């Protein structure tokens, strides 16, 4: 098994014990989604409207990197309609935004310190990490709009030099300035 395609997910789904899964594609999700994957699995969320509890993706106890694709994700019905990562050792989080624009209330990347958004389709969201001195890198040809609230104070560096679509964000203060 290399790729698993799921349609209309409104429940939990766990592939962490399945050997060889490289991609889990979730199409048309319209409810609470709790997904668990093994290290090295990319999760692609396509044409999803989510639910008030949002989408939780557990990358397990050993994964250091997480990759999620977003295509036509509209998780903005309520403030808690988030895409939330869990994973004890996550340090890198990558979002590949493709196809049709996506709107997510919050992308919560757990303790990741290196966050990358590759946007070839527009993204509207806020982002959160629980680790200070994190870096956000934005690339691609599409607009990234993160100005609904102040940028997470744990993100100290933002690099959008490789993004040609535009970036909107609201900078907050983190109290670390000398």
Image (tube, grey):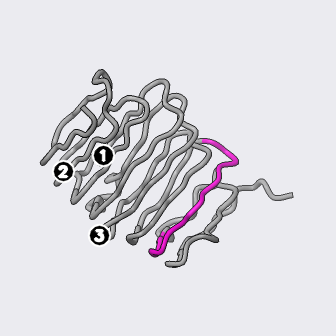
Image quadrant in which the N terminus is located = top left
Tell me, for residue 100, which label it has, or none: 3
Q: Earlier in the sequence, mark 2 or mark 1?
A: 2
Few, some or many residues within 10 Å of mark 2 (<14, 14–19, 20+): many
Q: Is residue 109 above or below residue 145?
A: above
Q: Earlier in the sequence, mark 1 or mark 3?
A: 1
> What residue is rendered at 42% in x and 27% in y?
60
> What residue is rendered at 49% in x and 45% in y?
109
Q: Which residue is mark 1?
A: 55
Quarter holding residue 24 = top left
Q: Which residue is mark 2?
A: 29
* Callout 1–callout 3 Cβ contact below 8 Å: no
Q: Residue furthest right?
A: 178
* Callout 2–callout 1 Cβ contact below 8 Å: yes
Q: Is residue 109 above or below residue 14?
A: below
What span is in magenta?
131-145
Give how far across and how far down residue 159 sits, in percent.
65, 64
């Amino acid at each position: 098994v290399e790729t698993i395609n799921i349609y209309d997910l409104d429940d939990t789904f766990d592939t962490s014990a399945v050997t060889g899964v490289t991609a889990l594609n979730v199409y048309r999700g319209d409810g609470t989604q709790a997904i668990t994957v093994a290290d090295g699995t990319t999760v692609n969320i396509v044409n999803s409207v989510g639910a008030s509890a949002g989408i939780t993706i557990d990358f397990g106890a050993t994964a250091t990197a997480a990759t999620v694709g977003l295509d036509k994700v509209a998780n903005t019905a309520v403030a808690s309609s988030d895409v939330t990562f869990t994973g004890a050792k996550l340090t890198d989080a990558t979002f590949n935004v493709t196809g049709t624009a996506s709107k997510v209330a919050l992308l919560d990347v757990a303790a990741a310190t290196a966050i990358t958004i590759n946007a070839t389709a527009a993204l509207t969201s806020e982002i959160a990490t629980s680790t200070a001195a994190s870096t956000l890198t934005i690339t691609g040809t599409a607009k990234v709009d993160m100005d609904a609230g102040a940028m997470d104070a744990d993100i100290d560096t933002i690099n959008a030099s490789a993004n040609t679509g535009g970036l909107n964000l609201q900078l907050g203060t983190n109290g670390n300035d000398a």
